[in-house]
Amino acid sequence: VEKSTVPVKTAEAIEKILTHNSKGIKFQILSNPEFLAEGTAIRDLFNPDRVLIGGRETPEGLKAVETLKSVYAQWVPEEQILTTNLWSAELSKLAANAFLAQRISSVNAMSALCEATGANVQQVSFAVGTDSRIGPKFLNASV
């Protein structure tokens, strides 16, 4: 089970290594990236926004995905457990990180614009964050 942020198709490389070194042993590679925030990792583990599980779209892969899903279902509501193919799970984690970085970069650029115009960055962030399409998370400018 891949837990880390990895490049897309890492599962393929892992599979080749394990196949070469584990002759005759059957296994499945799953991607189960963590979405933990710094300072709230334990809370995020026990109360995640979502759990993402990716596997091969073969009978064996789907069975492995369902097995891991049943573990998470002990404490995570089923509607928060998302299943995809391996590559979608790996790319989803990278895309989430990219979206967060883009959001933080945008807020920092807005902060510079506020300084140049006399606007208050906290007030602008609050006003922007009340838009339901945007939301208030990660709208604080960095120093």
Image (cartoon, helix red, strand yellow):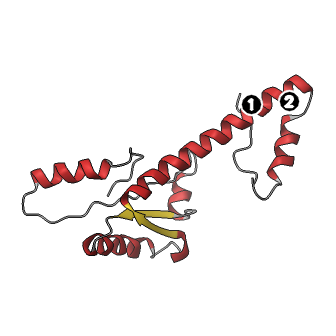
Image height check: is 110 above or below 134?
Answer: above
Across and down, in percent, residue 51 comes to 49, 64
State the residue at coordinates (30%, 71%): 64
Dot 2 amino acid type: Cys
Q: Residue furthest right?
A: 118
Q: Secondary structure at mark 1?
A: helix
Across and down, in percent, residue 120 comes to 89, 34
- Which residue is under mark 1? 109
In the rendered picture of this protein, how many numbered marks are placed on residues? 2
Q: Earlier in the sequence, mark 1 or mark 2?
A: 1
Give the class, few, some or many, for how many residues have Cα within 10 Å of label 2's Cα (few <14, many ≥20): some
Across and down, in percent, residue 123 comes to 88, 41
Across and down, in percent, residue 4 comes to 39, 48
State the residue at coordinates (28%, 71%): 58
Q: Secondary structure at mark 2?
A: helix
Image height check: is 109 above or below 123?
Answer: above
Dot 1 amino acid type: Ala
State the residue at coordinates (43%, 57%): 89
Image height check: is 8 above or below 114?
Answer: below
Residue 127 appears anywhere in the view? yes
Give the class, few, some or many, for how many residues have Cα within 10 Å of label 1's Cα (few <14, many ≥20): few
Q: Are marks 1 and 2 in contact (CB under 8 Å)?
A: no
Q: CA distance from mark 1 to mark 2?
A: 9 Å
In the image, 39: left or right of 117?
left
* Quadrant occupied by the N terminus: bottom left
In the image, 140: left or right of 24?
right
Q: Residue furthest left?
A: 23
Tell me the number on the disc at residue 57: none
- Which residue is under mark 2? 114
In the image, 124: left or right of 66?
right
